[in-house]
Image (cartoon, grey):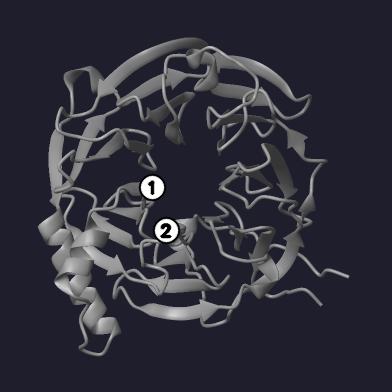
Amino acid sequence: PTLFFCLYWKAHPTNHTMDFSIPPGIGSVVPGRHSPASCLSFHSSGKRLFVAHEGDHRLQIVDCLTGKADQAPSKIERETIQLVHATHHEDCILFTGSGKSHIQQPVGQKFAVNYMSVYDNKTLRKFRGHSDRVNSLSQCPENDTFLSASNDRTVRLWTLQSAGCLAECRLPSDSTNSPLAVFDSTGMIFCMTAQMSNLQGHHLHMYDARNHAAGAFAELQLSVQDLSKAIVDASAVIGGGQAMPVDQATTLAQYPFCSMQFNASGNQILVGSSCGISLLLDGFEGTIQKVLLGHTANGTSKAACCYSGDDKHVLTGNADGTVDVWQVDTGSIKQRLDGAMGGGPIQSVAFNPAFQQFATGSKDVAMWIWGGAQA
């Protein structure tokens, strides 16, 4: 039998220190089927986890209090599913497809953002406008607006209350078609990032969500030279003085970003790269603070990373099923957790916003807790 329980944070997460000196364990494993969990999103209540399985177009819902599947997985064949994001309503989600459905659809339909009720599996609204794959979704924590960033070179601002786009931010002219966009924890600021077309760096543009029409109030750049140097320096620390060759570091620095998250205070941004590296950036200046160079940072898999609830640690998933726990202040690994029960390479990781719990997604979904583990 499975022993599973959650310890509720009565204090605000930023005031509650996560004690990784007492290792968390896997309290429950929710079995997958044929494809890995490509995206994880907790509801703000902490009671539900939404899981997207892109490979076989399934949406899975996990009850975080029991560690079991809340209902049978939903098959989403027409729209397909590759990103899922919880909204303020516990029974409603946003999701986007890969655009690879076998069912013929207009372009605007294939790449629409879908607002769905999981209570009765009905689509409540479709947000049409993107003409290519959506890379990221971000719900404002304070109201019903949300962001979508697409390979069509636009970031769009929407509200759940109506289907029309509220605003459209176009990428800088010298950027590629792989943007990301995310709100900070207050919902007052959002950041948009895109890789430069000459692969010489990344744009980071900051917007005031209340005055987005005025354009970005800060237009920052992260150069490949700075990132490459930071990777070399980090590799020397990990390798005991043996640094990574500069050309190898430069190659890793030229990979696009695949995820982005503000910490709770908004003064730092965690970025995951498609090469497996995670970065900690200054939330105001965009400069590199730390490079989290795990053993999967080799260009073969995307980084799976997230902050812990107290922002003092970063969790990164590895190809061997382990999870690295990094100290934010030092940029060093505090602990490596054995995730063998999770079923293969970890492709996604998320921390519960209300409970001492986190989830990792591979072939199966592993729910990690403190004070209890599978017997």
Residue 269, percent across and down? 30, 52
Residue drawn at the location 35% of the way across and 36% of the way down: 181
- Amino acid under label 2? Ala
The residue pinned by badge 1 equals 258
Note whether 10 is above or below 183 in the view shown.
Answer: below
The image shows residue 352 at horizontal and vertical percentages of 58, 54
The crowding category of the residue bearing disc 2, from other C-alpha atoms within 10 Å (few below 14, some 14 to 19, many at least 20), is many
Which residue corresponds to the image point at 50% horizontal and 11% vertical from the top-left? Answer: 163
Q: Secondary structure at mark 2?
A: loop
Q: Between disc 2 and disc 1, whose residue precedes? A: 1
Circle 1 sits in a helix, a strand or a loop, which is it? Answer: strand
Tell me the quadrant of the picture where the C terminus can be found. bottom right
In the foreground, 118 or 363: 363
Residue 198 in picture, x, y percent from top left: 15, 42
In the picture, the quarter occupied by the N terminus is: bottom right
Q: Are marks 2 and 1 in contact (CB under 8 Å)?
A: yes
How many residues crowd around disc 1 within 10 Å: few (fewer than 14), some, or many (20 or more)? Answer: many
